[in-house]
Image (cartoon, rainbow, N blue to C red):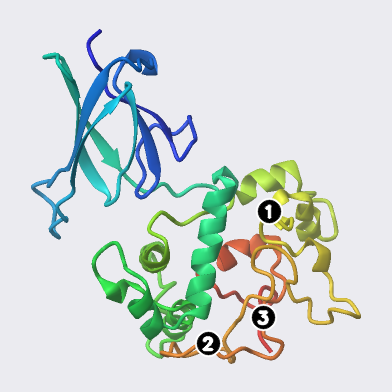
Amino acid sequence: VNPVISVASVNGVAERKTPEPYKPTQLCALPGCEENPNVRVCWSMQLGLPADQIAPLPSVSHHECVSGTTYTYTFTHPGEYIVSADLEGSPQSAQATLRNVYARREVRQLTSSEWQAWVDALWALATTSTALGRARFTCPSGRQEDYHEHAYFVMIHGALSANSTCDQLHFSMMQEFAHQGWNTMLERAMQCVDPSVALVWWNEAADRRNFGDDDADDVSASLLNSPIWSNEYMGGRANYEASATNPHAYVQNGKFANFPLRRGALPRAQDSLPRLHRGGQLRLARPEGIHRILVYGAAPAGHPRRK
């Protein structure tokens, strides 16, 4: 049988057919991913260098001969890899070019370990200053300046939005480009903590169809039946309304329970741990503003507020 290279799974998920950085990829050397333990296959991986690449990529190569026709390899830096599979003792071989790219998924499409890695990375930004993070973590880009503490991104939004000349983040058609660039900076900072993570998003439209009640007095409350508001994800369902024991409606459950926020409407990013606002906790976010927690870390009045 002539060898054919294909992807069987990525990070244990069979539906994923494209390698992703820093996640194990199971490769197959035979059609249909048939396993043959009696065959030895020599695998070679080489990160290609596209002619239009602006920044030089690191030299990444790997070679290993194994028994069996499946092989698990963790691709590292994003880019195109030339993958070869040579059947030992036979002239038969196969070659394929595989793109190793990050995938930004809806939060519920992540595995439990991927979601926890994302949560841990954002918590690290919230509790590790810029100076300490650059000394402690290794940014996969090779640029330690990619790491910034969480307060830095809150500061960017506040400072650029309140620019005395004009709003630098929401002016005309600039909004999408400014926020895309801003989010990419956040993603790179998180990858300094864990290079396997990528930004996530929330499919609010699907939740409005499945759980929302547009005729309800409080449409946001009707969305609380979504798993997003369970303890597994963002929490908040149990403290949607202020109570005697939680008068400020702080988020006290979920993955971001008691998430620290800097004091003041416009915090300054410093090389020290963020100061907490009174209570030191995240207020409850309404469902329509959850993307501001996932990505921005700041929200207008009525969402995560500060005292």
Q: Is residue 183 left or right of residue 145?
A: right
Would you call the spot at circle 2 few (<14 residues within 10 Å), some (14-19), or many (20 or more)? many
Image quadrant occupied by the C terminus: bottom right
Q: Amino acid at mark 1?
A: Ile
* Residue assigned mark 3: 305
Look at discs 2 and 1 and give the one toward the viewer.
2
Would you call the spot at circle 3 few (<14 residues within 10 Å), some (14-19), or many (20 or more)? many
Residue 37, disc:
none
Q: Is residue 67 left or right of residue 241?
A: left
Cα distance between the residues tagged 1 and 3: 20 Å
The residue furthest top is: 1
* Residue assigned mark 2: 274
Q: Is residue 192 left or right of residue 258?
A: left
The residue furthest right is: 244
x, y percentage for residue 221? 80, 59
Q: Residue at x 54, y 71 (%)?
A: 123
Q: Amino acid at mark 3?
A: Arg
Q: Is residue 234 visible to the viewer in this orientation of the structure?
A: yes
